[in-house]
Each structure stands twice: as C-alpha cells, then as structure tokens.
Amino acid sequence: MMALVLSLLLALATGIGPEDFDRPEALAIVHLFALGWLAQVMLGALVQFVPVLAARPLAFSRLALPALLTSSFGTLALAGGFLSLDGYDIARPFFLLGPVALGLSFAMLAVMILSTLITRQTLRLPEVRMVIVALAGLAGLWLSGAAMVSTLTGSRLAVDISQALPLHMLFGIGGFLTFAACGVSYKLFAMFLLAPEAASWQRRAVFALAALMAGLMMTGLVMLAGAGSVAPLLIGVCGISLAGCALYLDDVRRLWRARRRPTPELNMSCSRVALAFLALSVLLLPFAIWQGGALARASVFAALVGWLSTLTLAQMIRITAFLTWIQIFAPLIGRRKVPVVQSLTHPRRAGPALTIWSLSAGIGTLSLATGFHAGFRLALCGLLIAATQILCELVAIRCLSHLAPPERPARLPPLILPSLMNPPHSAENQI
Amino acid sequence: MTDLAAGLEQTLRRVVDPETGRDLIAMGMIYEARIAGTCAHVTMTTTTRGCPLTEMLRLGVEAALLAMAGIETAEVRLTWDPAWTPERMEPLSL
Ligand code: HEM
C-alpha cells in the first residue's frame, strides 16, 4: 500500500504525462507500482491463499519475512537503478543488484508456494495448475527483465530490447499477475458469493489456454537468445488472450448467477468493475501489439490500474476485515456473542473511494489512448486521493473503529497484520 | 424432542458463521448432533476446506457444548466428506 501511494506521489511530482513513458523516471515509477505494490500483494495473497487451495499448512513459512524484505529491497534497487539511465551513475550498482535480490525473493516464494501446493490430489484442480503456470510466468518475467537490465548496463549478455519488451510486459501483466489473479479469484469469488465451486469446462479451458500461452511466451524467450523475431508468437498470444478472457468472464458470470448471497458485498460489486477493465485491456491488446504507442500504454494502464489494482483493493479491504476478525474474535466463538465480519468495515466509506479509483482508472486509460496530458494528470490525482482514503479505511478496520464501543476489545491488535511475523495470538484475555 | 436434544439445537443455533451472520445449523454445516449420557457428539464441516477459521469453529462448538447443563464431555469432529455446498443452507426466512 505504501508503494502504491509512493508511486502515485512520484508520478505526480515528476510531472509525468502520456508522452513520457520511456523516461527513466517513468520506468522507475512503473516498477515501483508493478513490483512494490501489485507483485508484492499478489505473492502475499498466494502465500495466504495456497494453504486454503491445498487444504494444508504453508510449507517453509519461515521464508515469508526474508522474502518480503529482499523483494522490497530489490524493488527499490531496481527503481533506483533505472535512474542511472538518466546519467545518475551512482545508481548503477543498484541496477544490477535489483534483479539479483528480486530473483532471490521470487525463488523463496516459489519454494513456499510449490511445496505447499503440489500433492497428488491438488494437481488435479484447474485453479492450482493456474497458480503453477503463474509462477512459470513470474520466472519468464524475471528472465526477460534481467536480460534487459544486463543489456542496458552494457554487459556481454545482451538481447534486442524491442523484441524483449513486449514479451516482458506480457509475462508481467498476463503470464504472472493475471494468471495468479484468475487462479485465486475462482475460489475467492465462490466463497464471497456463496456459489457452488464445481470446476466447469470453461475453467479447464482457461487453464489449458493459459498453459499454452505461457509455453508460447517461453518459446519467445528462447528465440530472444537466438535473435529471432517474436512477432508471430505475439499474434498467437493475442488470440489466446482474447479467447481465454472470454471464457474466464463467462465462468465468473456463471458463479455470479448461481450465488446464494442475495446482495453481493462491496468487494464483489467492485470486482465486476475490475473485470470490465480486464476485458478492455485484452480488447486493446491486438492494437497494442500491432501499433504500439498510445494504445499499448492504454492497454497496460487499464490492466495494471483498472483490472489488477481495483480487484486487489476491493478484496484487500474485505480480507483485512476477515483476518482482523479472526485475530480478535475467533477465539470467542461459542463462548459469547461475536459481531459479524462485515461490521468491521464501512461500505459507505470504502465505496466512494473505490468508485473514485475506478473512475480515475477509466479517465487515465482514455487519456493515455488519446494523449491528453491534463486528463492523465487528473486521473493520477484521483488515484492518489482514492488510495489515501482506502489506506485510512484499512487503518480504521485494523483499529476496529467501525465497531460499536461495547464490542471493541480493550487492547487493539497491532496495525500490521501478524500473519508474516507470528501466529495469531489468543485474544481471550483482551476483551 | 427431549429437553436435552432441544438444548443441543438451541446451543448450535447460537454459534454463528461470522461471514454470513447465520447460525451453523442454518448454514447446513452440522452433519450430525446427538447426546449420549453426558457426552455431546457433533460432526460438522466448514464452507471451505482449509479455511483459516476451521479449527476455531470446531473449538467454538466444543466450548458451547461444554457450557450446556448436563454435558461433561464434547466430541466435535470435522469432515469434508461430503463437502459443503450452498444448497445445504436453509432458505432465508423473510
Ligand atoms: C510484475 C512485474 C513487472 C511488470 C508488470 C513490468 C512491466 C514493465 C513495463 C510495462 C515496462 C515498459 C515501461 C515503459 O515503457 O514505460 C517494463 C520495462 C522494463 N522492465 Fe519491467 N515489469 C515488471 C518486473 C520487472 C523485473 C522483475 C525486472 C528486472 C529483473 C524488470 C526490468 C525491466 C526493464 C529493464 C525494463 C526497461 C526496458 C527498456 O529499456 O525499455 N521488470 N516493465
């Protein structure tokens, strides 16, 4: 969340507009946003969620904190390193250190996730396979990124950046973040909507297409080393993305229709907006690949800000409330009356913030597509306001501010969720 | 229904699923509940296998049963066979 607010602040402070996306500052900000905010939250969510998918405790859970710290350092080093492209030579060593630290952190997380997830029973589930494909996407993202860093620092291992960049963006946004989000969202949506979870043919098809797409992109990586053109592969990736996205959306619509929760909560109605952005960014993809430029930037923005961030923010509020509830009230179940999870949140506060976020994401996408400088700056302001409000709401949830005073415990839980630090402690003596 | 059996139902209806605000019987999460002498036996499930709340719910049911008059021991077993589906929920009374 800090990385999110920081990257938006920096984007406003450095005066970045639609035409400046190749500037080193813009590259630094894009990576602060993509790695410091989205990748960090997504990997954290996988670490939390993989035990639910596999129905067993997280393996090597001690690696969680070192992985978090190394990835934060790696992100800052990479972002700082981009500035060396602008002549700040002092940042050059960081440019190489960033990918090393990030690689180390990704490896630790992959060990935790894969050793929890891979069992004979779980491997049959399409959403589990989807998470595994997402980790392959993460590997591809790192390889393509590290190869470009190596090229930019003038080392002997060099690739053609114009070929590597589209693959890198597809690996990051599609192969890693979107595949992971899809894998997790099936279960999450079914849980929040109280919908039957049975794996449909659409889900199996989405997984098969995701695996095919990852395979094509990996082939692209190999071709980079041989200096071949990746253009034909990109056309294939584009077709698969369109088909996969349509099937995924159809599957979610099926869950939505079969739901037992009559009025879906805020997190689910906002997720629908996020899904609309997913559709938009995939629809823009053919234009992005054929024309590049403004439409490519719009597609990337719609995906990172509109699709992935809206989904993450909406679910984050709900999941923070759930984990806070467990920490405080779970030990009291059956012993006294406990409030419901929803009473820890305040939809009237989170709702407008998420609406401002989504509207700003829309304005930003449109401004990038049309090269409208003022519109893009306005969108950045909106995003910053919304992110700050959501941050305040998360703090309020952790402080149990929305709960009626008699229901509040005498001692509040620590502001930072303890799941990475130590197991939830008994709260029995706190109330 | 004997007093004890009615008490058992009442007790389980006081344990609430925090996600939906509905009690465990209305959620269809109680598969079996009976009393033998001074021991209460309950077989229950959770909506999602591997949900972080699982053990807490089991312990909560156990604590609620032990608070019943005439009950000295409680045995609460978790099962996911058959798995919970939303069809198990009691319809909402309007
Ligand atoms: C989820 C994670 C990531 C996402 C979504 C992402 C996305 C992007 C995007 C959109 C660009 C183009 C930016 C622009 O043209 O303004 C880019 C460029 C770049 N990325 Fe990443 N990236 C991610 C992770 C990484 C990692 C882990 C590395 C290094 C190990 C890396 C290294 C680079 C480099 C060197 C460039 C610049 C290429 C050039 O000179 O144009 N990225 N990335």
Image (tube, rainbow, N blue to C red):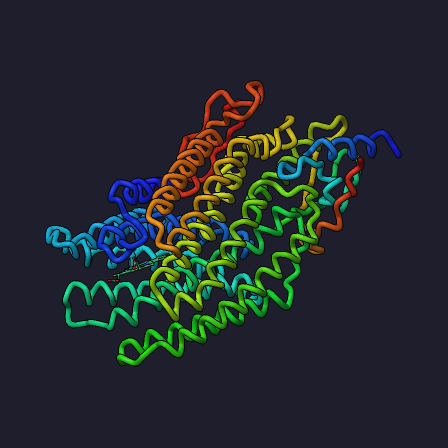
> Could you tell me residue A89's position as x and y percent?
10, 53
- A429 sits to left or right of A235: right
Taking the image in four quarters, ligand 1 sits in the one at: bottom left
Residue drawn at (19%, 67%), measured in percent from left and top?
Answer: A151
Name above or below for residue A168 compared with residue A36.
Answer: below
Q: Nearer the viewer, residue A417 or A222?
A: A222
Q: Residue at x 46, y 66 (%)?
A: A133
* Residue A43 seen: no
Q: Residue at x 18, y 64 (%)?
A: A152
Image height check: is B29 above or below A413? below
Give coordinates of residue A227: x percent, y percent.
26, 79
Residue A271: x %, y % from top left? 54, 48
Residue A310 seen anywhere in this rendered image of the structure: yes
Total marks shown come to 0
Quadrant occupied by the N terminus of chain A: top left
Classify residue A166 by image quadrant.
bottom left
| Residue A107 image point, x, y percent | 34, 60
In the image, residue A105 above or below residue A213: above
- Name the residue rendered at 27%, 81% in the picture: A226
Figure quadrant of residue A27: bottom left
- Residues A314 and A288: in front is A288
